[in-house]
Image: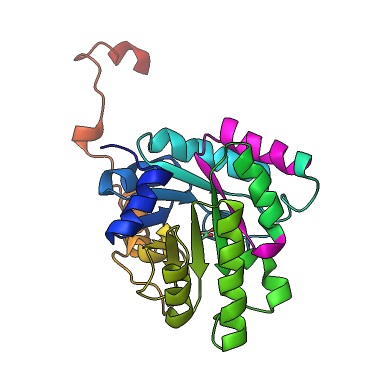
C-alpha cells in the first residue's frame, strides 16, 4: 500500500474520491486502522477524553501528543499521520510555535499538524507551512475553545455564521493548509465551503457534501465505559461490551479455578522434583 500524501489528497477531491480518516492514539489501534485501509490517521487531542479520562481536550500536553503520536507512528508506518497541536501551544510567538511543531514532527514522527481556528491563526499557519510542515485546518466547533463557545453546539446555522465559516476557510486556504476539518457544521454551510475552496474538506458531523469523513476511533467502536449516542456517529462494533465480557470471563475462571487448565501449564520431567518435598 502506498501512503497517501497531501498532493494525492487534493487529487482525490478533484476525482470525487472520499478521503477516509480515523483517530488513533496507540500502537495497536494505529496498526489495526492501517490494516483496515484508512487513508489518514489523526492523533487527535480527543485523546484527552478517549484515553486519558479528562472531560475535555484542554489538559492535553505536547508531551502527551509526542508520546502517543510516536506509538501511532510505530503501528502505522505506511499511513499519513496528522497530530493535533494542543491547547494554547500555537498562540504565543512564532518561534515558540515552530519549536513545538518541530518536536511533534521530529519526536512524535507525525507527517502533518492540525490546528483549530480561522483567520485569527492564518499568519501562524503560514509560518508553519513556510517551514515545510503540512497543516490541516479545523473550523466549526473547535473543542479547544469550548469554554468560550459555551458548549458543543452546531455551527453555521444562519447566514452570518455560515459566512464567517466560509471566510475562515478561505483565509486558511490562502495561508496554505492542505485541507480543513469541519466539525459540527450544517450540511449546507459545509457544502458551500467544500465547493468554494480547492483543498479537501474533512467532515465530522458536517453532512454528506464534503471531501472526506473523520470519526473518533472510540466512538465508532463503542470503546468507552459510558457510551453516549451522538447523532453524527455511526457505530460499527461494540468493543466496550466485548472487553467487559472478556475480562469478566477471565475473572470468573480464576475464581472458579477453571483457568489455568492442563494445556496452559509447564511440566517438569517425571519425578525429578520429588526430593524437594522433603
Ligand atoms: O481530536 C480529534 O479527534 C479531532 C477530530 C474530532 C477532528 O480533532
Ligand atoms: Na482535536
Residue 81 is situated, as x and y percent measured from the top left of the image, at: 45, 43
**How many numbered dots are placed on residues in this image?**
0
**Residue 15 falls within the magenta-colored stretch:** no
Quick one: 237 or 33, which is closer to the camera? 33
Residue 137, position as x, y percentages in the image: 56, 57
**The magenta segment:** 96-120
Q: Residue at x 61, y 53 (%)?
A: 175
Left or right for 167, reference 93: left
- Locate residue 27: give its quadrant: top left
Describe residue 134's horizontal placement relative to residue 266 as left or right.
Answer: right
Is 258 situated above or below 49? above
In the image, what residue occupies the spot 58% across and 73% down?
A: 165
Question: Of residues 246 and 237, which is closer to you in this image?
Answer: 237
Q: Is residue 265 left or right of residue 27?
A: left
Q: Is residue 272 above or below residue 140?
A: above
Rendered-image quadrant of the N terminus: top left
Location of residue 80 in the rendering, given as x and y in whole percent from the top left corner: 41, 42
Q: Residue furthest right?
A: 93
Query: For residue 105: magenta?
Result: yes
- In the rendered image, the quadrant that contains the C terminus is top left
* Residue 58 place in picture, x, y as percent: 68, 60
Amino acid at each position: 500500500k502506498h501512503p497517501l500524501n497531501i498532493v494525492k489528497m487534493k487529487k482525490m477531491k478533484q476525482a470525487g474520491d472520499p478521503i477516509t480518516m480515523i483517530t488513533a492514539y496507540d500502537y495497536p489501534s494505529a496498526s489495526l486502522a492501517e490494516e483496515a485501509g484508512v487513508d489518514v490517521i489523526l492523533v487527535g487531542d480527543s485523546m484527552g477524553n478517549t484515553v486519558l479520562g479528562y472531560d475535555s481536550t484542554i489538559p492535553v500536553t505536547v508531551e502527551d501528543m509526542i508520546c502517543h503520536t510516536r506509538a501511532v507512528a510505530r503501528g502505522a508506518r505506511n499511513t499519513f499521520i496528522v497530530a493535533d497541536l494542543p491547547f494554547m501551544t500555537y498562540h504565543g510567538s512564532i518561534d515558540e510555535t515552530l519549536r513545538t511543531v518541530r518536536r511533534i514532527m521530529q519526536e512524535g514522527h507525525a507527517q502533518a499538524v492540525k490546528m483549530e481556528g480561522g483567520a485569527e491563526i492564518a499568519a501562524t499557519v503560514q509560518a508553519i507551512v513556510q517551514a515545510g510542515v503540512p497543516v490541516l485546518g479545523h473550523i466549526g466547533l473547535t473543542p479547544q475553545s469550548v469554554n468560550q463557545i459555551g458548549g458543543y453546539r452546531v455551527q453555521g446555522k444562519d447566514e452570518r455564521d455560515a459566512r464567517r465559516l466560509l471566510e475562515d476557510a478561505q483565509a486558511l486556504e490562502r495561508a496554505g493548509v492542505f485541507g480543513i476539518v469541519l466539525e459540527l457544521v450544517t450540511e449546507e454551510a459545509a457544502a458551500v465551503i467544500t465547493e468554494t475552496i480547492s483543498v479537501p474538506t474533512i467532515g465530522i458531523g458536517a453532512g454528506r457534501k464534503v471531501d472526506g469523513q473523520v470519526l473518533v476511533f472510540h466512538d465508532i467502536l463503542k470503546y468507552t465505559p459510558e457510551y453516549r449516542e451522538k447523532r453524527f456517529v455511526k457505530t460499527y462494533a461494540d468493543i466496550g461490551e466485548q472487553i467487559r465480557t472478556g475480562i469478566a470471563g477471565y475473572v470468573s475462571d480464576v475464581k472458579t479455578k477453571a483457568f489455568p487448565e492442563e494445556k496452559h501449564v509447564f511440566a517438569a520431567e517425571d519425578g525429578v522434583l520429588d526430593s524437594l518435598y522433603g
